[in-house]
Image: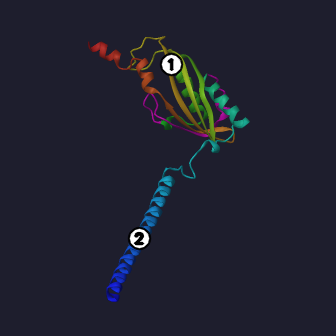
């Protein structure tokens, strides 16, 4: 009887010990899994979080009085006040854009180069007027303006099928780098496709063939 009881007790102990070990192993596995999931979630959160160097609204630089003046004069320059080029355009001014007439952007440089380009624009588009829609948005030495231009086609663009006097409206974005109160770099992004559509670009040649 004692032998039987001892065997039963040993079996119970073995079963209990096995159960306990499995329970401990399971608990450890759950803990390890929870830790792994937690690390994975944290890693995902870190991946989706903005980089420490990303520009956020908190990084936006307050528009200074000097910046405000230069940007106001910049719009006035494009509205035809060509004398302002000497005051606000740096001698080493550089344009970064694709020109409508196919010239490289290096064709426009310095105050005189920009003033000549503005004058040419006013010859092609009569009553040309620029107004600011958004901005200025300033980050350090960089300023961004979203503008709208209105005017009338003045003629003289090869391939344009629009009649002289056709009303035009197009938009664009200027990115300027300003140093020492002067514009040194100019990145232009204009809605050229819309402008060419309004000018009926290529339609004159197509009509002549027909």
Earlier sequence position, callout 1 versus callout 2: 2
State the residue lying farthest toward the left.
210
| Residue 108, percent from left and from top | 53, 34
- Whether 81 is among the magenta residues is yes
Seen in the picture, residue 179 relative to 102 is either above or below; the reply is below
Compared to residue 18, the image places residue 26 above or below, namely above
Q: x, y (%) of residue 137?
A: 62, 36
Q: Nearer the viewer, residue 23 or 82?
A: 23
Q: Secondary structure at mark 1?
A: strand
Q: Secondary structure at mark 2?
A: helix
Q: Work out whether residue 16 can be spotted.
A: yes
- Residue pictured at 43% horizontal, 20% vertical: 157
Q: Let me know if residue 140 appears in the view.
A: no
Residue 28: x, y in percent? 44, 69
Q: Is residue 84 left or right of residue 16?
A: right
Q: Position of residue 127 (x, y in %)?
A: 57, 15
- Residue at 50% x, 22% y is 170
Tag 1 residue: 169
Name the residue located 47 percent from the left edge and 54 percent from the top edge.
44
Residue 198: quadrant of the picture: top left
Q: Quadrant of the N terminus?
A: bottom left
Residue 73 on the magenta span? no
**Left or right of 119, for residue 1:** left
51 or 102: nearer the viewer = 51
The disc at residue 23 is 2
Query: In the image, which disc is placed on residue 152?
Result: none
Residue 177, by quadrant, is: top right
């Amino acid at each position: 009887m004692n032998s039987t009881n001892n065997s039963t007790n040993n079996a119970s102990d073995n079963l209990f010990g096995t159960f306990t070990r499995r329970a401990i192993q399971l608990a450890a596995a759950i803990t390890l899994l929870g830790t792994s999931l937690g690390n994975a979630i944290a890693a995902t959160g870190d991946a989706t979080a903005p980089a420490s160097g990303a520009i956020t609204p908190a990084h936006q630089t307050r528009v200074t009085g000097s910046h405000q003046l230069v940007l106001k004069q910049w719009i006035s320059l494009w509205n035809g006040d060509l004398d302002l080029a000497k005051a606000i355009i740096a001698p080493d001014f550089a344009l970064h854009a694709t020109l409508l007439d196919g010239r490289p952007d290096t064709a426009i440089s310095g105050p005189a180069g920009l003033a000549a380009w503005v004058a040419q624009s006013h010859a092609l588009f009569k009553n040309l007027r620029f107004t600011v829609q958004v901005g200025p948005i300033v980050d350090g030495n960089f300023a961004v303006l979203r503008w709208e231009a209105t005017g009338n086609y003045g003629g003289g663009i090869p391939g344009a099928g629009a009649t002289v006097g056709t009303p035009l409206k197009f938009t664009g974005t200027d990115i300027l780098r300003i140093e020492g109160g002067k514009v040194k770099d100019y990145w232009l992004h204009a809605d050229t496709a819309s402008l060419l559509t309004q000018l009926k670009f290529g339609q004159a040649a197509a009509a002549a063939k027909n």
